[in-house]
Image (tube, rainbow, N blue to C red):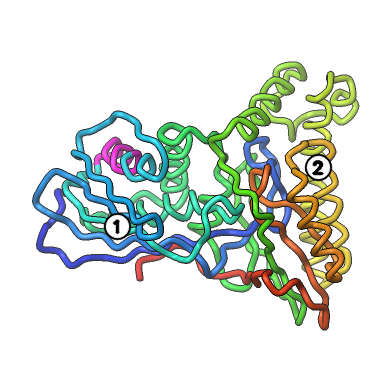
Amino acid sequence: MPPDPSAAPVRAFGPGRVNLIGEHTDYNGGLALPFAISRGIVVDAAACDELVVRAHAIDLDEEYAFAVSQRARVPGWRGFVLGMVAELGALGVSVGGASLEIGGDLPRGAGLSSSAALEVALCLALLAISGVEADEFGWLELARVCARVENEWVGAQTGLLDQIASLRGQADSALLIDFATLGVSPVPLRLDGWRLVVLDSGQSHEHAGGGYNERRAECARACELLGVSTLTEADASAVERLPDPLRRRARHVLGENRRVLAAVAALREGDMPTLGALLDASHASLRDYYEISTPAVEATVARLRDAGAAGARIMGGGFGGYVLGLFARGAHPPEDALDVHPGGGARLL
């Protein structure tokens, strides 16, 4: 269905996410436990009768315009917009002309998945002004569309974790995602006076940079040597015969899967001290086995622990960004820490 230029403008919201535990397991066929948060990206969209998309990124005060037929890749946030138009077109959605305003309150490069939040908000907004119901495709197909934008148009080889968390988030719940089956199960996240906060390390990261993609390549090479499709399928004894650094990468994945299951059990039992210990163990593995921490991140983890955190760890792709901390009742996080709460998923506002 072609877009109707007389249709009312729409506003779409894509939430950011915090991954409670289960880092770098998504593209390894493993387990993760993310939750959507109340902060996110907002896209205001209106159809127009020209075959041109005009986009304005409010926080950067940058403009971008392109013909809907354009397929040449472009850098930065522009790649997300152009890629989404192209990928929806490949599904038979006639986007036509559009005017987009991109804003929100989710910081970029922080490990809170601003990329997926932007993708999801763009997807819902462009579908809406094109007269297409998101339910026609289903959440999994939309997650794959968003991931293709990031993989093929922006150059970051992320998995589906961020997109699924943004699309399927539920208030007061985390999502247990099994990436072997793409099954999603809500897990109640009742803090009962405890607090989850994130604290900026002051070092921005970019998924499309070399470190994240290098780790993915190392995992793929480990799978080749082990004769498995994903590292989650690997036998622990066989992993120990891998050369370093592949052995360390695989050790992290197998250990992190076990920590996700232990975290689910801890949440169901209301055992927050155990959850804190699991966050610490996850950080140690990401630092020592996956080697994605930095001095700035380590200093931030130390700040949280000095303030009384029951557990703290690096989040997201690594090499900077925000650090997650868990605080007991009565403990006081650093003043510049941001409280995060599980919120609802992506939606039209």
- Graded by Cα atoms within 10 Å as few (under 14), some (14 to 19) or many (20 or more), the crowding at tag 1 reads few
Taking 184 as reference, is 89 above or below it?
A: above
Q: Position of residue 71 (x, y in %)?
A: 28, 30
Residue 291's x, y, as percent? 77, 36
* Left or right placement of residue 79 versus residue 315 in this view: left
Q: Residue at x 37, y 39 (%)?
A: 79
Q: Give 270 or 180, whichever is nearer the viewer.
A: 270
Judging by the rendered image, the residue that carries numbered circle 2 is 287
Number of other residues with Cα within 10 Å of mark 2, as a class: few under 14, some 14 to 19, many 20 or more: some
Q: Which residue is mark 1?
A: 133
Q: Residue at x 33, y 45 (%)?
A: 81
- Measuring from the top left, give residue 48's x and y in whole percent: 13, 54
Residue 86 lies in magenta, yes or no? yes
Magenta span: 83-92
**The one of 286 and 302 positioned closer to us in this rendering:** 302
**Identity of the residue drawn at 80% across and 72% down:** 327
**Comparing labels 1 and 2, the label whose residue is closer to the camera:** 2
Q: State the quadrant of the C terminus.
A: bottom left
Q: Secondary structure at mark 1?
A: loop
Q: Which mark is first along the chain, 2 or 1?
A: 1
